[in-house]
Image (cartoon, helix red, strand yellow):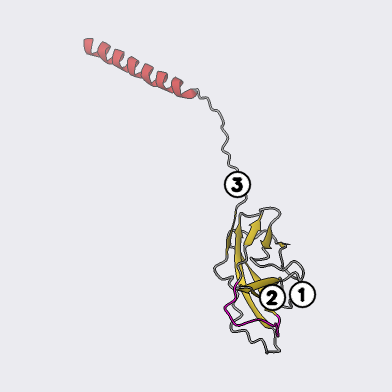
Amino acid sequence: MKLTKLFLVVATFGAMLVVSDSAARADSNSGTFTVTAAVVAKCTIDTTTANIDFGSYDAFATQDYAQSGDVVVACTKNAPNLKIALSGGSNYDTVSKLNQMASGTERLKYGLYQESGHTTAWHNASRDISSVGKAGVTYTIYGLAKAQQDVGVGSYSDTVTATINF
């Protein structure tokens, strides 16, 4: 009989543990929290393929010299108010509104244009561009040096800065 009482006590205590454990798990409480991030507009501009080389300029040639270069712009998706601007270069001529390459005191004038027809100048101005995204978009810069400029022998160069505004 003693064994039966011990068994009954152990069985009762075990049942109480099961009931007690079940009761503890029946209640719960929860809360919510917020996860946030602010995505900022950012752009990059790659000018490694933007160099424009008119080659050997023949002052007696009757054909204009046309060359182009590319800039690649990449921006955060949906970045607003994107504009690409080209400076007038180191030797910009405010009278003719043309860029100038220099060789000492000599100047060889050229223009930078937004299209191959050379009608929309890009001199010291910005151009609205659409949202470009991370993949990047290539924008071609069309350069034109008019023929028959009266310039001296030398190596001519200019430095133009391309800037993306956003």
Q: Is residue 148 on the magenta stretch?
A: yes
Q: Specify whether residue 1 is in view.
A: no
| Callout 1–callout 3 Cβ contact below 8 Å | no
Q: Nearer the viewer, mark 2 or mark 1?
A: 2
Q: Residue 165 is drawn in which quadrant?
A: bottom right
Q: Which residue is mark 3?
A: 39
Residue 14 relative to residue 70: left or right = left
Q: Secondary structure at mark 3?
A: loop
The relative height of residue 92 versus residue 43 in the rendered view (above or below) is below
Tell me how far mark 2 sits from mark 1, CA to CA: 16 Å
Q: Is residue 7 on the magenta stretch?
A: no
Q: Which residue is mark 1?
A: 119
Q: Which residues are magenta?
A: 146-157
Q: Which residue is mark 2?
A: 109
- 43 and 98: which is toward the camera: 98
Q: Residues within 10 Å of mark 1 (few under 14, many from 20)?
A: few
- State the image coordinates of residue 61 (x, y, percent, origin top left): 68, 89
Q: Amino acid at mark 2?
A: Lys
Q: Specify whether residue 4 is in view.
A: yes
The residue most toward the front is 105
